[in-house]
Amino acid sequence: MTGAGNVGQFGIVGSTVVTPNEFFSDSSSGAVLYYPYPAGGASTQTITSGVFYPFSAVISPASSRGNAASGARATLAVRR
């Protein structure tokens, strides 16, 4: 997982690994990174906005009410 540093508890959904990265080099407070699974390599998406020292990522099904993105979304548990 290129660019990952201090990776916490990750989640896998389909062909994607969602991983918290507590000390992401491009952010002073960490990031959530998405990687191809099982291939690995460079992250395909990075979230830094609103992320503060992420510790774990949990994958939950999308809402059936139509107000959430299709597929799955990442829900973060944050250590303070």
Image (spheres, rainbow, N blue to C red):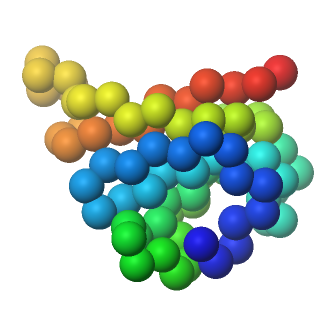
Examine the rendering and report whether any part of residue 51 can be seen.
no
> What is the quadrant of the C terminus in the image?
top right
> What is the quadrant of the N terminus in the image?
bottom right
Residue 67 in picture, x, y percent from top left: 21, 25
Front in this rendered view, residue 29 or 8:
8
Residue at 48 percent across and 75 percent down: it is: 40
Q: Is residue 16 left or right of residue 67?
A: right
Residue at 54 percent across and 37 percent down: it is: 57
Q: Is residue 15 left or right of residue 65?
A: right
Residue at 23 percent across and 30 percent down: it is: 62
Question: How many discs mark residues in the rendered view?
Answer: 0
Examine the rendering and report whether any part of residue 75 can be seen.
yes
Q: Residue furthest right?
A: 28
Q: Is residue 10 left or right of residue 15?
A: right
Residue at 70 percent across and 73 percent down: it is: 3
Residue 38 in picture, x, y percent from top left: 38, 71
Q: Quadrant of residue 52?
A: top right
Q: Quadrant of residue 66?
A: top left
Q: Is residue 15 above or below residue 74?
A: below
Q: Is residue 31 above or below residue 77?
A: below
Q: Quadrant of residue 61?
A: top left
Q: Is residue 30 left or right of residue 34?
A: right
Front in this rendered view, residue 30 or 14:
14
Residue 19 in picture, x, y percent from top left: 57, 51
